[in-house]
């Protein structure tokens, strides 16, 4: 089909990369200094080797999500899936390597609720240090086996939530410093549940999983067990401050660090790249977590000085994080807005954002809404050399890039707004 013309400019993109196809764009380079994990097209957790890019899928619907980009993070839980050491059971029957885990191995443990009135709990025996004011990610995998158990997942004694793994119902929150509880459905009845913990002191604490009664918001309560309810558990994680909740990092005796993903696309490989004549960049993406500090970029370009173009998904410095778009030149002319109106970004929410620039105007649009325009010279310098889908190591998206499109030449506001529509 012939391209439609709009004021002499074609409406088809000069460059388009759909990351759901599982391939890197031509000319791109990728690095990550460690192995890492993601869900494959069958919904199973699989390992990608060092310097191998990950293409993630929704583990329940099996929908392709695209290229997974995450910052460096460390799992401080030294035994994330072996419960024979580093864990203490109280009034439960704990079995190690008793169920099939989300990675297909028989490495998941089971917890059987004992009969009688007691605290029914599994608790990590090493404690994890944290620093006042820092924010940490806490997560685990869980599946109901028998009965209809409610469980309570906590860190720091009184921070956490109740959850019903048989139905996926999120129950009462505790009175501690928790936020952003996410229950992500997997295949075969599994869930990955997670929350963000904000430290109110510099000290240490433990992870705990308790059986609870429905609606019981008391931390580590005494309940009357039925002797029947059983859950499968696996993949515990306590993550680096400010990383949020990232993909699973297995451990087996010591803390493990996953390196950052970095995908670089030389601008010379973008068809029609004309930095001095303006253009439009469009990114479709999903945040998988909300970081505590700095921004999360779906796309990033930089000349090593004061000139950059960003499609910024959110900024942790905002009170109540909202979608952020940044477009700056020489630190003088810029659009740098915080969007705190609905819909604010949440984990796994699909968004499309467009950034336009040219000789007289800069534009930012998100999900079909033009959020900001500004008059001024936004032409980009020729010193820009590379585009980083998913951000660079300092401002990683911590999520998936579904697609990227580039349109050469400055465009009108309506064009930029239309490109951002879902």
Image (spheres, grey):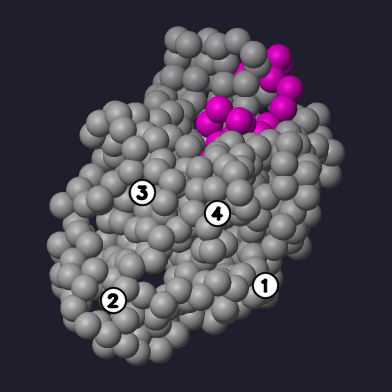
Q: Quadrant of residue 204?
A: top left
Q: Which is more N-terminal, label 2 or label 3?
A: 2
Please tell me how crowded label 1 is: few (under 14), some (14-19), or many (20+) other residues with Cα within 10 Å: few
Name the residue tied to disc 3: 206
Left or right of residue 378, residue 5 in this image: right
Magenta span has 19? no
Left or right of residue 14, residue 392 in this image: left
In the rendered image, the vertical position of residue 21 relative to residue 301, given as above or below: below
Q: Which mark is residue 79?
A: 4
Question: Between marks 2 and 1, how big is the CA–CA gap?
Answer: 25 Å
Name the residue tied to disc 1: 105
Q: Of circles 3 and 2, which is in front? A: 3
Magenta residues (range): 379-398
Q: In the image shown, does 150 or 63 lie closer to the viewer? A: 150
Left or right of residue 241, residue 387 in this image: right
Q: In the image shown, does 385 or 221 lie closer to the viewer? A: 221
Residue that extends furthest to the right in the rendered view of this protein:
27
Question: Between marks 3 and 2, how big is the CA–CA gap?
Answer: 20 Å
Q: Which mark is residue 150?
A: 2
Question: Between marks 4 and 3, how big is the CA–CA gap?
Answer: 13 Å
Magenta span has 395? yes
Which residue corresponds to the image point at 72% horizontal and 41% vertical from the top-left? 34
Question: Between marks 2 and 4, how big is the CA–CA gap?
Answer: 24 Å
Q: Is residue 322 visible?
A: no
């Amino acid at each position: 089909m012939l391209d439609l013309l709009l004021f002499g400019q074609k409406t088809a993109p000069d460059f388009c990369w759909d990351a759901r196809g599982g391939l890197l764009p031509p000319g791109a380079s990728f690095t990550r200094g460690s192995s890492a994990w993601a869900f494959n097209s069958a919904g199973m957790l699989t390992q990608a080797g060092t310097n191998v890019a990950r293409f993630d899928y929704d583990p329940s619907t099996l929908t392709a999500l695209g290229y997974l980009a995450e910052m460096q993070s460390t799992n401080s839980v030294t035994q994330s899936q072996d419960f024979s050491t580093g864990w203490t059971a109280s009034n439960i029957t704990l079995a190690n390597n008793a169920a099939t885990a989300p990675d297909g191995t028989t490495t998941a443990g089971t917890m059987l609720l004992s009969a009688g009135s007691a605290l029914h709990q599994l608790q990590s025996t090493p404690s994890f240090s944290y620093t006042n004011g820092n924010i940490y990610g806490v997560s685990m995998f869980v599946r109901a086996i028998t009965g209809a158990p409610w469980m309570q997942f906590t860190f720091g004694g009184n921070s956490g939530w109740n959850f019903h793994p048989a139905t996926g119902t999120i129950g009462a929150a505790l009175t501690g410093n928790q936020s952003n509880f996410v229950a992500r459905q997997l295949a075969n009845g599994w869930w990955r549940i997670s929350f963000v913990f904000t430290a109110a002191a510099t000290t240490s604490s433990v992870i705990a999983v308790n059986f609870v009664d429905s609606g019981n918001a008391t931390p580590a309560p005494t309940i009357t067990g039925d002797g029947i309810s059983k859950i499968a558990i696996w993949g515990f994680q306590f993550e680096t401050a400010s990383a949020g909740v990232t993909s699973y990092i297995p451990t087996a005796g010591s803390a493990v660090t996953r390196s950052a993903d970095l995908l670089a696309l030389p601008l010379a490989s973008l068809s029609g790249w004309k930095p001095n004549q303006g253009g439009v960049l469009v990114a479709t993406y999903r945040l998988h977590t909300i970081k505590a500090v700095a921004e999360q970029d779906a796309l990033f370009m930089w000349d090593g000085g004061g000139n950059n173009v960003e499609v910024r998904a959110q900024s942790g410095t905002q009170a109540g994080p909202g979608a952020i778009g940044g477009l700056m030149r020489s630190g003088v002319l810029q659009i740098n807005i915080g969007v705190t109106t609905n819909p604010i970004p949440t984990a796994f929410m699909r968004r499309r954002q467009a950034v336009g620039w040219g000789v007289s105007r800069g534009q930012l649009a998100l999900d079909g809404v033009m959020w900001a325009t500004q008059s001024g010279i936004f032409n980009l310098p020729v010193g820009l050399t590379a585009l980083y889908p998913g951000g660079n190591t300092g401002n990683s998206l911590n999520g998936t890039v579904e697609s990227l499109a580039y349109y050469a030449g400055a465009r009108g506001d309506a064009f930029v707004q239309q490109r951002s529509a879902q």
